[in-house]
């Protein structure tokens, strides 16, 4: 059974379990989410086996992949879901690929090389988040001799930069039409994808407002869940429906004054990523620490903290054409570009959510976040008066650092923050 | 015309200029003369524009000392080693003489080095150029926009405008350097090369640390001597090509050559890649001379033999294959610097394509500093044996 088939079975099992024994303490919208995940994997498997539709990696440009008539390959998202990737690191080593770069960017290579996951029929390699999220799909495309198109994003946002990226997207569409069988670009579909993604985005904005409440109505684990944009699913409307349900439930919780923690003593912003092989939020919750948000590259845009996702005219002072909208999205990831974009965004988020501390996950090999980690901690201390814990680790490798060591560091940090809060209140 | 020494001594002066004790020499003299120095962090920065502003384009090398304790307080140790060693040099006050530092997004590690550089405020001016990872016409146009902006920033630094004449003069100087360096590469191509790979890297890095005019004068004066020079015949086989990035320490090549070979060609951004491509002005395409100059520079820098940061991997392999053929190379040694992600992700492709072309290749992950000497010699020795057994 391939990893993809295992995922279908896993999601089906979750759906069956929820159907048979609904748990009132869990979010009901989860069922819809598992159905979406299952349906995506089924569509990927079908396209892989039959070739009925082109498989296109969609981590960075889901609406465009949908508009090209492709089935999205969520390379990084799939890697995240391996949870524990020891066997994949070995595959990388034996094939001359790096084994100490950021986990999600390398594990997907091993998933494809080991035939556990379909390689895309067409690769879109963009520097949207970081160089590794660009060269990882490229390496897969070159390995399997598939057509690869590169989209270069920019260090800073400007009108020139927007035009530059939008022009490349136009070239991408022509390239795909000429080189990839089954591609059939439709602007109508692109606009439909924007529409569904915008519905989800409006829900995300509402959720973000709820995060600010004390006590926080979101569990750390829910906050940590990376949002999946509706257009990456075969049925974007169902993806938008999930967000509507999720937001409604969050509202209900908040209106009832139902905080996830009985006694919220502290609030931490969790930044970058985290260990996927254990749940650090249980430890935090036991000590009364809420984690209202995960700060990552597109966090502020996706949750509307700065600009809207699509259709927001504020940033450029005019209505943008569809490909310009995509270009605006591509150039807006705070992981990419100059460091102050990421540092400012992280500090703004911590301030906005009234956080008492930041847990900054120092993911091995993450060039985007590691190189400015001290800038975050120094400025957080100076400008917000809050400390930062640099928690070293790997997302998918429990052998890099023990769970016990991580827990000890978090507990010590909680003590420090509690003492700090106590002395402040005196 | 500067005073020149047309002899082995003159050659040695140049080949040792990059040593840590010597490398600031010209920059400090430049400062004493009341002129400004800009530290460049990448081979995609248009030196012509810096030169046209009357500022010394001085390429920043890191400290060659083993530890980077100060840098490690700012950057995880398991990140780009060049960046860590450069930051160590900055934080230990070895780069205090710089009036400006210019970075690019060669990779994100370099951007993050630049972020810290700006934050610590040890250099008055911090500039960065957004260099595309693709070399299409669209990308050339975007880079030209970046270069126009960079001209404005260099004008501010220089305190005077940069004219078209300034730019044309600087292009001529830099082109002269490129022609001279390529002449040196021709001398490597002789059956018994004029100098070792170690010496050649000393020469190519010297040009990155001194005034181009003086480098040109010195090489012109040395050429008659160099054209007759030969390394010992027993050290001239097998002929290998070394491929790496940010390799500024000739000691790495010395260790390889001590294993019993000559590095007769390189694929380095401190070597061939930095000098290979010329600036070609076209009379037809642009409405003004300024636009044409800047477009020509953008074309030159984006079309130069590419670093792995560029996405044209097949062209990069083809370039190496051509050099292997043109320089009668028997094997390729790839020296990925630790945590150089672009090269690491390209490694599978690079190796497979060279093997398909029948070119033996070995790869050894290196530190920024010269280390593990015994192990490198053993690995290279085994590689040489393998090549010779096939010959």
Image (cartoon, coloured by chain):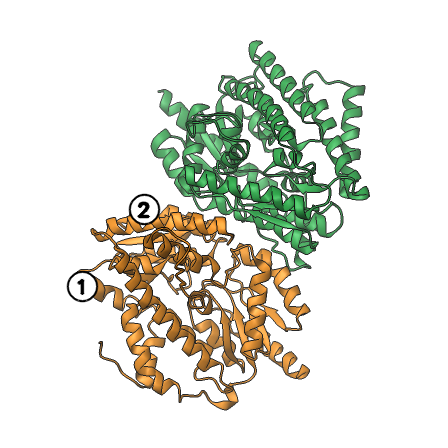
Secondary structure of residue under mark 1: helix
Q: Is residue B187 above or below residue A380?
A: below
Q: In the image, residue B117 lies at what x, y percent? A: 35, 49
Question: Residue B377 falls in which quadrant of the image?
Answer: bottom right
Query: Chain B appears what colour?
Result: orange
Same chain for the residues under marks 1 and 2 in the image: yes
Q: In the image, residue B207 lies at what x, y percent? A: 34, 70
* Chain under callout 2: B
Q: In the image, residue B4 lies at what x, y percent? A: 25, 80
Q: Earlier in the sequence, mark 1 or mark 2?
A: 1
Q: Which quadrant of the figure contains the N terminus of chain A?
A: top right
Label at residue B32 = 1
Question: Residue A239 falls in which quadrant of the image?
Answer: top right
Q: Residue at x 31, y 73 (%)?
A: B215
Residue B31 shown left or right of residue B9 in the figure: left
Q: CA distance from mark 1 to mark 2?
A: 25 Å
User: Label 2 neighbourhood size at 10 Å, few (<14), some (14-19), many (20+)?
Assistant: few
Q: Which quadrant of the figure contains the C terminus of chain A?
A: top left
Secondary structure of residue under mark 2: helix
Residue at mark 2: B120
Q: Residue at x 50, y 41 (%)?
A: A165
A2 or B378, which lies in front?
A: A2
B19 or A390, which lies in front?
A: B19
Query: Chain A appears what colour?
Result: green
A266 or A310, which lies in front?
A: A310
Q: Residue at x 42, y 42 (%)?
A: A339
Nearer the observer, disc 1 or disc 2?
A: 1
């Amino acid at each position: 059974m391939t990893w993809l088939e295992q995922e279908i079975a896993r999601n089906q099992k979750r759906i069956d379990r929820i159907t048979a024994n609904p748990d009132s303490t869990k979010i009901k919208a989860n069922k819809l989410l598992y159905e979406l995940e299952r349906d995506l994997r089924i569509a990927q498997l079908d396209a892989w086996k039959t070739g009925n539709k082109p498989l296109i990696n969609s981590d960075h440009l889901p609406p465009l992949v949908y508009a090209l008539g492709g089935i999205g390959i969520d390379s990084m998202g799939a890697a995240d879901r391996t949870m524990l990737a020891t066997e994949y690191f070995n595959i990388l080593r034996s094939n001359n690929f790096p084994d100490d770069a950021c986990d999600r960017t390398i594990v997907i290579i091993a998933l494809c090389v080991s035939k556990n996951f379909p390689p895309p029929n067409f690769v879109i390699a963009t520097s949207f988040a970081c160089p590794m999220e660009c060269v990882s799909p490229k390496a897969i495309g070159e390995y399997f001799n598939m057509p690869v198109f590169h989209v270069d994003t920019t260090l800073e946002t400007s009108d020139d930069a927007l035009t530059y990226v939008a022009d490349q997207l136009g070239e991408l569409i022509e390239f795909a039409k000429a080189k990839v069988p089954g591609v059939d670009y439709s602007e109508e579909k692109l606009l439909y994808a924007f529409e569904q993604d915008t519905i989800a985005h409006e829900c995300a904005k509402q959720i973000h407002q709820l995060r600010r409440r004390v006590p926080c109505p979101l569990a750390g684990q829910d906050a940590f869940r990376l949002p999946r944009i509706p257009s990456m699913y075969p049925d974007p409307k169902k993806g938008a429906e999930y967000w509507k349900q999720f937001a409604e439930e969050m509202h209900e919780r908040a209106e009832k004054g139902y905080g996830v923690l009985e006694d919220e003593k502290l609030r931490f912003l969790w930044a970058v990523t985290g260990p996927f092989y254990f749940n650090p939020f249980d430890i935090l919750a036991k000590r009364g620490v809420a984690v209202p948000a995960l700060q990552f590259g597109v966090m502020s845009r996706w949750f509307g903290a700065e600009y809207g996702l699509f259709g927001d005219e504020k940033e450029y002072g005019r209505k943008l054409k569809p490909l310009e909208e995509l270009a605006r999205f591509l150039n807006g990831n705070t992981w990419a570009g100059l460091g102050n974009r990421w540092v400012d965004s992280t500090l703004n988020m911590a301030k906005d959510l009234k956080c008492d501390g930041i847990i900054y996950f120092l993911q091995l090999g993450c060039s985007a976040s590691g190189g400015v980690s001290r800038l975050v901690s120094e400025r957080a201390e100076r400008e917000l008066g809050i400390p930062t814990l640099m928690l070293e680790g790997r997302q998918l490798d429990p052998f890099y650092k023990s769970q016990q060591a991580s827990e000890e560091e978090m507990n010590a940090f909680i003590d420090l923050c509690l003492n700090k809060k106590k002395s402040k209140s005196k | 015309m500067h005073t020149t020494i047309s002899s082995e001594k003159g050659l040695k002066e140049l080949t040792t200029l990059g040593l840590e004790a010597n490398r600031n020499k010209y920059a400090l003299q430049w400062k004493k003369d009341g002129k400004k120095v800009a530290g460049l962090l990448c081979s995609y920065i248009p030196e012509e524009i810096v030169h046209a502003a009357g500022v010394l384009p001085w390429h920043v090398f890191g400290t060659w000392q083993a530890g980077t304790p100060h840098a490690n307080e700012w950057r995880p140790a398991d990140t780009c080693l060049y960046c860590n060693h450069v930051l160590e040099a900055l934080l230990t006050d070895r780069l205090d003489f710089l009036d400006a530092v210019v970075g690019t997004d060669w990779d994100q590690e370099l951007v993050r080095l630049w972020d810290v550089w700006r934050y610590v405020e040890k250099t008055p001016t911090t500039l960065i150029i957004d260099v595309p990872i693709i070399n299409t016409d669209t990308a050339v146009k975007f880079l030209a926009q970046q270069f126009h902006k960079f001209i404005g920033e260099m004008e501010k630094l220089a305190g005077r405008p940069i004219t078209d004449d300034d730019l044309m003069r600087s292009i001529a100087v830099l082109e002269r350097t490129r022609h001279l360096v390529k002449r040196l590469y021709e001398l490597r191509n002789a059956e018994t090369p004029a100098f070792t790979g170690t010496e050649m890297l000393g020469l190519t890095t010297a040009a990155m640390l001194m005034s181009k005019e003086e480098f040109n004068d010195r090489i012109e004066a040395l050429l008659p001597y160099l054209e007759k020079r030969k390394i010992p015949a027993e050290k001239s086989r097998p002929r290998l090509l070394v491929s790496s990035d940010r390799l500024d320490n000739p000691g790495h090549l010395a260790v390889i050559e001590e294993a019993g070979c000559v590095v007769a060609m390189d694929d380095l951004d401190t070597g061939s890649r930095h000098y290979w491509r010329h600036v070609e002005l076209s009379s037809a395409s642009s409405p003004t001379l300024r636009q044409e100059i800047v477009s020509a520079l953008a074309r030159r820098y984006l079309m130069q033999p590419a670093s792995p940061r560029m996405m044209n991997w097949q062209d990069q392999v083809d370039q190496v294959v051509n050099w292997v053929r043109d320089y009668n190379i028997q094997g390729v040694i790839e020296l990925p610097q630790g945590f150089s992600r672009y090269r690491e992700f390209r490694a599978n492709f690079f190796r497979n394509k060279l093997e398909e072309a029948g070119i033996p290749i070995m790869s050894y992950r290196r530190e920024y500093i010269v280390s593990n000497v015994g192990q490198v010699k053993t690995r290279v020795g085994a590689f040489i044996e393998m090549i010779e057994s096939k010959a």
